[in-house]
Image (cartoon, grey):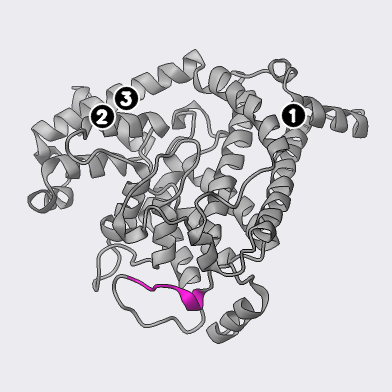
Amino acid sequence: MQKNKIVEFEDKFLAGYAMKSSASRGRAHQEAEHAYRTCYQRDRDRIIHSAAFRRLEYKTQVFVNHEGDYYRTRLTHSIEVAQIARTIACALSLNMDLTEAIALAHDLGHTPFGHSGEDVLNELMSGSGGFNHNLQGLRVVDFLEERYPEFPGLNLSWEVREGIVKHSSVFDIAVKIKEFHPKQMPSLETQVVDMADEIAYDNHDLDDGLTSGLIKESDLESLEIWQKINRTIDQKYAKITPSCRKYLIIRALIDLQVTDLIAQTQAEIASRKINKYTDVQKIDCKIVDFSSRIKGLRKPLRQFLMEKLYHHYRVVRMSTKAKRFIRELFSEYLKRPAQMPSEIQQRIPREGVKRVVCDYIAGMTDRYALDEYKKLFNPYEKV
């Protein structure tokens, strides 16, 4: 399809409150437009082909990479978020290409070893700008990816960059950068990704928790949302395997939340008389959200995951061990930066040794960080 046909499609079929590619604020470095891709389609493709995106394959969600190959990684999580977000965006007549690009990029700034890696890097960078994975994601796409001779980074559109830096879920904190108008609400496409992220986190961490044995189905029987779906599946299917039953429950949980989110958001858009994407920016709260009924059902589930999975002693052990690895790597590189690859060292005069060390560690996969640790501290390991 020619690009002008895609623009015509957006004008005809997307809602007035959708962010259309023809209204983009453009890129930091001017480029000729592509013949048959919109700016958001081009951004999505640049993200998929980036080194940072590929490295998500070996970055942890909850379980460290060597725990097993069934569990979610940052890569599979990002793909799952993109799938859920595209479904919601389509139902709301939003820009699916922009939504997908933001979803695929939303975790590019994550460290190895999940949120424990981010926590310890933020502690180590105290007084030197700190560390936040949204800001790091923006740093990755603006500076750290090296793919084009004409400019640094991926040179993504303003709207995708806003989606990265304003991404907010239960694990995120607000990031204040003047360029992105901190007090102004992000696009509905960004808000959709935020909620898709939460849906994916809750249900897929529950799936991984059950598979690992850290959570048992009997532990979930007190939860109303679990009881509701369990009854429906038991009535419909008399004889199914435990693994099939688990899959059906997780699928039903996702469907319940996505369906509710779409209906509630449509009602909110109508009641607030949102007609243009600029109307979204003027409202001081999120438009894309669940109904109070589903919020009430989700809250005990999230509390359960926090207590039974994220605070399980085995997960805490993994987290504590990961923090120790990162602290020791950081200290060693800081004392002797010549141990880092030469292309990394070249950035030190311009950016300072602490930030360069931070960038280097943040870009590592779980596997690479563990290998580096062995090379630096195990005298019998080849360097």
Residue 317, position as x, y percentages in the image: 41, 16
Q: Which residues are magenta?
A: 21-27
Q: Residue 289, can we see it?
A: yes
Q: Secondary structure at mark 1?
A: helix
Residue 316, position as x, y percentages in the image: 44, 18
Is residue 22 a member of the stretch shown in magenta?
A: yes
Q: Amino acid at mark 2?
A: Glu
Q: Secondary structure at mark 2?
A: helix
Q: CA distance from mark 2 to mark 3?
A: 10 Å
Reading the image, the residue beneath label 2 is: 123
Mark 1, Cα crowd under 10 Å, few <14 / some 14-19 / many 20+, is: some
- Residue sitting at x 13%, y 50%: 351
Reading the image, the residue beneath label 1 is: 225
Residues at marks 3 and 1 touching, judged by CB atoms closer than 8 Å: no
Q: CA distance from mark 1 to mark 2?
A: 37 Å
Q: Is residue 157 left or right of residue 353?
A: right
Which of disc 2 and disc 1 is earlier in sequence? 2
Which of disc 1 and disc 3 is earlier in sequence? 1
- Residue sitting at x 69%, y 38%: 292
- Residue sitting at x 42%, y 51%: 166
Is residue 37 a member of the stretch shown in magenta?
A: no
Q: Is residue 280 above or below residue 330?
A: below
Q: Is residue 91 left or right of residue 119?
A: right
Which numbered tag is attached to residue 333? none
Residue 356, position as x, y percentages in the image: 18, 45
Reading the image, the residue beneath label 3 is: 323
